[in-house]
Amino acid sequence: MNRSAILHIPASQYAFACAEDRFVLRLRAGKGDLDRCTLFYGDRACISSPVQFTSIDMKRKYQDELYDFYEVTLTKCPRRICYYFQLEKETEKIFYYADSFHRELPDLVMEDGFVIEGRSEYYQYPYILRSEVVTMPEWFVHAVVYNIFPDSFADGRNHLPGRGHEIAGADGTQSRSRLGGTIRGIKENLDYICGLGFNCLYLNPVFCAGEYHKYDIVNYFHIDPCMGTDEDFLQLTQAVHEKGMHIIIDGVFNHCSWYFPQFSDVVEKGEASAYKDWFYDLTYPVVRPETAETEPGYACFAYERKMPKLNTANPAVQEYFAQVGRYWIEKFHVDGWRLDVANEVDKSFWRKFRTAVRTADPEAVLIGEVWENAEVWLKGDMFDSVMNYDFRKHCRDFFALRRTTADAFAWRMTDMFLRYPIQVSCAQLNLLDSHDVSRFYSLCKEDYGLWQAAFLYLCMSPGVPSVFYGDEKRIAGIREDEYRRGMPWEESHTDEETFVQTVIEIRKKWISPHDDYSVLLADKKKDLLVFERNGLHRIRVLIHLGSDPADVREYTSGGKILLEKEYMASRLGFHGYLVLVMDQKSGIV
């Protein structure tokens, strides 16, 4: 037995509560190494001595390149749990608990029959506290998100000017646009968005700011004048909700504009300013550098001298932005926040912000911009979700750049899914592109069939799918000004839009957010991926990117074909990819 491969971590993604009476346990082992893994669990506070354990076989549910992952879900389990594992390989049988391997259990029976208990030496989960069970807003895990960069979308029905303008702000600052998109334009195209099947909008920043992208915010309590008015935004949120949709807005709290009133006060008054502790690394006198080549005398976002960094550990800063969080929910009824540069912000800031937002709306969602493993932010006290750029990275390497084989892709997706408790993984905001990265279509060298294959995976895999505006119209772009190009309303893409609509409809009708995800085949030589979602129904998805024919009859027989889409037909051994639906009992719908 390869003991070095065995891993279990208490109170982590290896041991967590899904509900007050549902508990999931996982154990990692070497790939193909164990013959059997059995869990023994009992009530840590039971009256009887020794503890009365119940045994249950753990299922080898996932695998990556090196490991197998065993999992079991306990239902109606005790709130106080103690447990250990029995591992078997051929004639070898050992107990695993307290991060060690043992030939015997810790309980000792003395000659007179007295039992010396070892219950404190087993693995333990002290108590399933209601407050510590991580849950998500139910509406969000059912969301299919359409991400809009407001300046680039529309100013009217099926229309975008394609040119910018400037408007003087109330405080004397200038607001700029590049392509002329407005809040009213978004509202007038809700039928188009709904028609594609999307039920949630995520808008990049809409507050008063200087540049067209609106990440240099001057006033957090008003809509940018180039985009419209506060009343326009209220009408938008009302129209969104009337259609049964939700809306998420972008919160930029790591930094602000160098014309943000509190920063202007520091520039004017120096060390006498009441706001001097609102910003990082000030050098007095604080001046606004005239050129980008001049290093600013204050910390800023990346290299952007126009965006001074806020001291988010300051209680006054925390209270100010907690008010911002509440304001847009209470007055405009937004349904959540996407939080910019979330990993650079003080964690106590996010805890206070979450409390304020959830007090205003217990169902509001909080999504952090964290590009890497976000485990520390997803414990239930800060964010519900993060933008899943690792999902994009793995899809990019497999579908677009073709530098990852099917088996490596499946392994990497498995490792990503197992980072978090199940309910957290199922709430990750999965994406192929955004306002910060090149269009996925361009990475596919404008092969729309490859984009379609990736989109199919996006919608059929665990997580909340998010699509950047215009992907359904083949928007391309590698550089920033290209991938933020205007929505091509004048172009007809009926076939592409129908495909997007069909896949989203299948997802909504046949898949539940918490359905099991399992890979049935990841064939390196054929470049063939077959996976399933199992719940009330069983959805089987086949994606073939190989150059040689692939015999997939064993994976398609007995099921009803919901979607059959052909792409790169001259290269494929079967017609593109298929989505099958099968009833769990009969195998046929």
Image: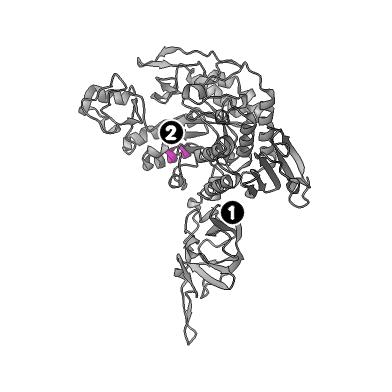
- Going by the numbered disc 2, the residue's amino acid type is Asp
Classify residue 547 by image quadrant.
top right
| Residue 383 inside the magenta-drawn segment | no
Question: Which of the two discs, 2 and 1, sits closer to the camera?
Answer: 1
In the image, residue 172 sits, relative to residue 390, either above or below, namely: above
Task: Tell me what residue is drawn at x 30 percent, y 23 percent.
Answer: 293
Classify residue 289 by image quadrant.
top left
Identify the mark nearer the N-term, 2 or 1: 1
Rendered image: mark on residue 340 = 2
* Mark 1 neighbour class, 10 Å CA radius: few under 14, some 14 to 19, many 20 or more: many
Q: Which residues are magenta?
A: 353-360
Rendered image: mark on residue 62 = 1
Task: Tell me what residue is drawn at x 43 percent, y 41 percent.
Answer: 355
Question: Furthest residue to the front?
Answer: 548
Question: Furthest residue to the bottom?
Answer: 112
Q: Position of residue 24 (x, y in %)?
A: 55, 56
Give the camera-side residue of 204 and 547.
547
